[in-house]
Amino acid sequence: MSGRLVARLAAAGLRLPATRPGPVRVTRDIPIRARDGVVLRTDHYAPGDQAAPTVLIRTPYGRGGPLRLLGRLLATRGRHAVIQSCRGTGGSGGTFAPLVHERDDGVDTLDWLRRQPWWSGVLGMFGVSYQGFAQWALAADAGQDLRAMVAVVTASATRDSTYAGESFALDTVLTWAELLHAQTVPWLARQRELKRGQPRLAAALDHLPLAEADRVATGVTIPFFQEWLRQHAPEAAYWRERVFADRVARVRAPVVMVTGWHDIFLPAQLDDHATLRATGTRPRLVIGPWTHGSPGLFVAALREGLTWLDVHLGGPLDDERPPSAAPVRVHVGGPGGGWRDLPDWPPPTVETAWHLHAGGELAVRPPGASAPDEFRYDPADPTPSLGGPLLVAKRAGRVDNRQVEARPDVLTYTSAPLAGPVEVIGPVRAELHVRSELPHLDVFVRLCDVDRRGRSWNVCDGLVRVTPERFPADASGVRRVPVSLWPTAYRIAAGHRLRVQVAGGAHPRWARNPGTGEPLGTAVTLRPGWRQVLHDPAHPSVLLLPIVHSAPPMPPI
């Protein structure tokens, strides 16, 4: 099947407007030289020799597969599609060092584009995940030429996603390091490893010290993994040249953002959205029921992205159309949910406190006098992570949590069945009062929807790493710990119950806390210890939900 036919079928399947007929000329492996002499290999999908808008995609994942389809789709819509491999990947020279060279290499590529006879002075960019980081690295320097951006499950800053809650996103970072290394091994060897269920990666996620985990997973030392284990401090100079959040406010081009409720970069992407809104721009935001690698996400990104480029770069038949879509479109999960258009993010809500009570109860009434609940956390047998925002789609998303809730190191607090639906849309947070045998600990909080069959489906969660400096204890040893959970849009149906989980970790999504305060990469000593969650009038522990519509719980039977 020809590439042209595949592109036509894909456009029809995505229900895109008509495209300009004609051949697409493809030139592969164009050598574009960066300022330091490194050659960046680039493919060009041309709609002809005429000057036309250009869409730039810079990627560390090779230029084949879905990007070939995207290149053709763009060219059939009258764009010059330029797809480039980041340095050290896909045949480009140099060494891949995440985020380090993307600004300079992007600027040098843009300089090359401006010298081409088919350059029209109009630029768009499209990027998923790391490709989006490369977009943000260049965007502020592209000036007036940049007319549109498509940012999919990505953000301008990765530091806070890498160290979510000031812990370490072990599963995301190590899985990504292994994925990048896998691009360098023979295809057949890679297929064998995948068929076996990636046992080396699984062993690496459980290995200590973490400084050896990259070699366990891949057989080699991965420099950026080692650096990220060492450069944990938020004020580290290391991250200043690797985050681009302070450049987002300088971008005036229209931006569409597509992400999912279970995406690893969702909080950071919403930070970018807030920054753009604060400058007075109107980005479009689409959040669906997706994980980082959901097939539905890819389809939605193509449809939203190509339509956005049509609107802001000119349609495929030169029909400049004003944007008509709502600025925010979200999928509300749970029974009776579905897609909603909103005027902005987050929408107006009423923050409602659901209090933790003795006996595992969750209720809106304030707590009475009660003894704390206690559990023992053992990092040698860490509480496992189950579903939620993970890099690998097949392990991410909504799952039944009853297996992990049965563990003795997980506390649960459950409401009475709801008399009517409760709709939660927006940022979610918790405030817990805890006492611990050890001064170094993690606090994990998860909101679940318990259906009529007793299945407990995760909605959103978050974790905070506690140190004596960040959360000092009072005279009685109690620490107040605020926990930011992932934002959500979810409808909990009548007859269902809300449940809050509290645990001492979620491994390997977050690296286990050894309880010793030792450095992240070298810690090997594991200290178990008891933790207490307080819920009395002086120490109310609460989950704070942004409620759009709610009904009180049913009275006890």
Image (spheres, rainbow, N blue to C red):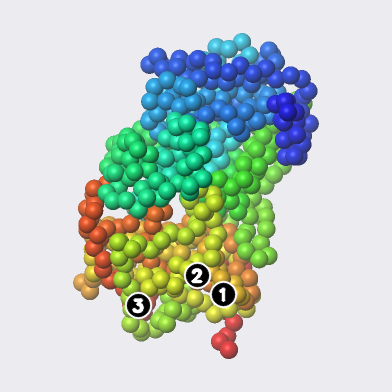
Q: Are marks 1 and 2 in contact (CB under 8 Å)?
A: yes
Q: Earlier in the sequence, mark 1 or mark 2?
A: 2
What residue is drawn where x is 45% and y is 39%? 179
Q: Is residue 555 above or below residue 277?
A: below
Residue depicted at x 47% and y 42%? 193
Secondary structure, mark 1, is: loop
Q: Which mark is residue 402?
A: 2
User: Which residue position holds label 3?
Assistant: 373
Q: Residue at x 69, y 44 (%)?
A: 325
Q: Nearer the viewer, mark 3 or mark 1?
A: 1
Mark closer to the observer (2, 3):
2
Indicate the position of residue 3 as horizontal and vertical percent values: 70, 26
Instruction: Give how far apart the Cα atoms at labels 3 and 1 are.
Output: 23 Å
Residue type, numbered disc 2: Arg
Q: Is residue 470 left or right of residue 386?
A: left
Mark 1 to mark 2 CA distance (whole Å):
8 Å
Amino acid type shown at disc 1 = Gly
Which numbered tag is attached to residue 454?
1
- Give the CA separation, mark 2 to mark 3: 20 Å
Q: Is residue 418 above or below residue 307?
A: below
Q: Residue at x 50, y 15 (%)?
A: 31
Left or right for 270, reference 329:
left
Quadrant of residue 512 within the rendered picture: bottom left
Q: Height in image: 424 above or below 180?
A: below
Which badge, 3 or 1, comes first in the chain's sequence?
Answer: 3
